[in-house]
Image (cartoon, grey):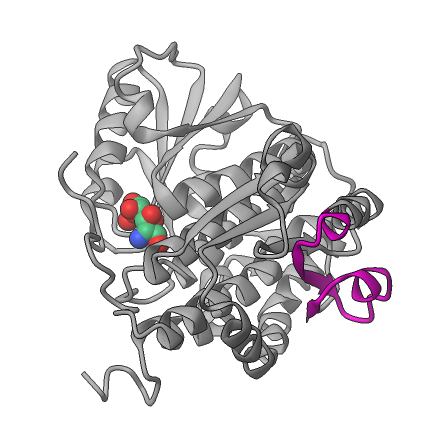
Amino acid sequence: EQIEKGGFDHFMLKEIYEQPLAIKDTYRGRLLVDDAIIKMVGVEDNMKRFLNADRIIIVACGTSWHAGLVAEYIFEDLARIPVEVEYASEFRYRNPVITEKDVVIAISQSGETADTLAAIKLAKSKGAFVFGVCNVVGSTIARETHAGAYTHAGPEIGVASTKAFTTQITILTLIALRLARANGTMSSSDYRRQLQELELIPEKVAEALKADKHIQAIAETYKDSRNMLYLGRGYNFPVALEGALKLKEISYIHAEGYPAAEMKHGPIALIDENMPVIVIATKKGHYEKVVSNIQEIKARKGKIIGIVTQGDVSVRELADHVIEVPETLENLSPLLTTIPLQLLSYHIAVLLGKNVDQPRNLAKSVTVE
Ligand code: AGP
């Protein structure tokens, strides 16, 4: 097992560090920047189904559901295709309206999640076209879907999903960009820029990982907290949810993710000097509005950990700590802002002496409902 961990203390840390390569493996052979082409067989072969779709319904659970939420922003923003994101467990039991004109995308790292599989079967029975995004090759979901694309992230052993999440976002970005070009939503110059920026993401993830030691020190300061709040807006709202889930599942600290502006509709009541608030406040994406949310937290003496773009000044003045990530396009920012949140959860759990790779009560894949 020590050998399998490749010199890391835990599989989770190894998998966090594998992300630059995993993301590259996801776009390898699919992202052809010089030719300004995205090549994905499963999408090309079914282009008509995608282009004629009234909407895309995404079904998934847990972290994969969070990737689906990011995809909702990506598909609507870049390709102007309406998207609904559903918890597979709710979708399967609520008699949903599905027609032959719907495209369903099922996201699952393991490809074995019982609720996601049941949602797929239901959608197929109503005549929808079902596309799978899985990591495990030959898994049940990969076989049960009409077509799909593998993330090629390599085996994910840690129960807490890390590289599966970022590679799912990568593949969903590729699909959305391909559709945006095919349906004429995106100009060729914007398309080119997107492709170039996506290609740079692995090295920017590697750059974000350099904050590891700094994040470990922040973890030391907050490890005894009983609650934590995660806030983000737009593309980074789902990242806030994912950050909170990561902390909950491996450190057993109660955490909640919220869209930053929803804070004043309830959660702000929780804020006092004992509440650390992690705020994703990157330059592109409602920056000024998030800064004003940070001022509100500060006025209530909350402890602020800002996830900011390199060189940020405004948040640094207000926050107790900042963690920098490189600059990128807004729609690609979740691939970077996720990294410090994974590391923060990891270090807190390790400092608390928790079983990081196999947290209590959890299984790597939930094959029963
Ligand atoms: C994430 O850290 C969890 N382990 C969990 O939420 C997981 O993402 C969920 O069970 C879905 O699994 P899947 O992607 O294999 O379908």
Residue 314 belongs to magenta span: yes
Q: Position of residue 348 (x, y in %)?
A: 43, 70
Work out which residue is located at the far left of the displayed protein and give it: 368
The quadrant of the image that shows the N terminus is: bottom left
Residue at 75% across / 50% down in the picture?
Answer: 294
Q: To which quarter of the image does residue 238 belong? A: top right
Q: Position of residue 21 (x, y in %)?
A: 47, 73
Q: Position of residue 360 (x, y in %)?
A: 21, 58
Which segment is the magenta one?
Answer: 297-323
- Relative placement, left or right, of 136 versus 336 is left
Q: Position of residue 248 (x, y in %)?
A: 38, 53
Q: 323 above or below 227?
A: below
Q: 117 above or below 64?
A: above
The reply to whether residue 35 is visible in this rendering is no
- Relative placement, left or right, of 33 versus 111 is right
Q: 227 above or below 89?
A: below
Looking at this view, is 339 or 277 the one in front? 277
Looking at this view, is 316 or 140 the one in front? 316
Residue at 82% across / 71% down in the picture?
Answer: 311
The quadrant of the image that shows the C terminus is: top left
Q: To which quarter of the image does residue 195 belong? A: bottom right
Residue at 24% across / 82% down in the picture?
Answer: 4
Q: Total number of numbered labels?
A: 0
The reply to whether residue 72 is visible in this rendering is yes
- Relative placement, left or right, of 267 versus 301 is left
Q: To which quarter of the image does residue 339 belong? A: bottom right
Looking at this view, is 277 or 130 the one in front? 277
